[in-house]
Image (cartoon, rainbow, N blue to C red):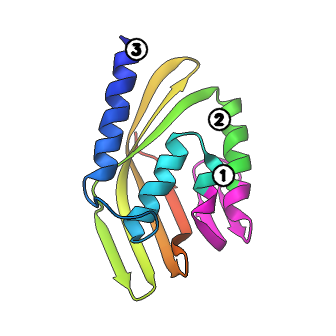
Amino acid sequence: MKHLKGLALAAAAAALLAMPYPAAAAGSTPMAAINQAVIDFNKGDYNGWAAACASPSQIIDDFPPHVWSGPTACSDWVTSFQAFVKKSKMTSMTVILGTPWKMAIAGNVAYVVLPVTFHFNQNGKPMKLLGSVMTIALKKSAGGWLMTGWAWADGH
């Protein structure tokens, strides 16, 4: 039964990621870049997530030290995140993006606000954090769109 629930969640996540912005190459639009970063995160490829960041970047998140900034902000966040999830006994983390509430693109910069659901296991128990919000700023580079900053606000 747990295996079937996991497959259902994975299928739902893939469908949600693909729905609003289909067939875009990674980084070709702001949402394609965000979607690829989330795909990497959901696979546990936190270096892939960090590669979606520009240098320098700014990050605000709900775990200490809460703010990361500068040329290594995203890789520093990955290090802090891995320590946090280990200490919190969290595994099987999956982010599911909702439809953006706001997307503003002005030339080579973009601003995206979207609801997020965060699934994970804590001490082996399935958990779901509903109503979280990500706000992401991006810039277009020669290789595509990169995150210049993002903030996470926990739901309930």
Badge 3 is on which residue?
Answer: 2
What segment is highlighted magenta in the picture? 50-76
From where the camera sits, is residue 153 visible? Answer: no
> Is residue 66 visible to the viewer in this orientation of the structure?
yes
Q: Furthest residue to the bottom?
A: 107
The residue depicted at 63 percent of the width and 58 percent of the height is 50
Of helix, strand and loop, which one carries label 1?
A: helix
Q: Which residue is mark 2?
A: 85
Q: What residue type is disc 1 on?
A: Asn
Badge 3 marks a residue whose secondary structure is helix
Disc marking residue 47 = 1
Q: CA distance from mark 2 to mark 1?
A: 16 Å
Q: Report the side of 77 relative to 23 (left or right).
A: right
Residue 154 image point, x, y percent: 46, 47
First in sequence, mark 2 or 3: give its number.
3
Apparent side of residue 125 relative to residue 28 in the rendered image (left or right): right
Mark 2 → mark 3, Cα distance in angstroms: 22 Å
In front: label 2 or label 3: 3
Measuring from the top left, give residue 81's x and y in whole percent.
Answer: 66, 45
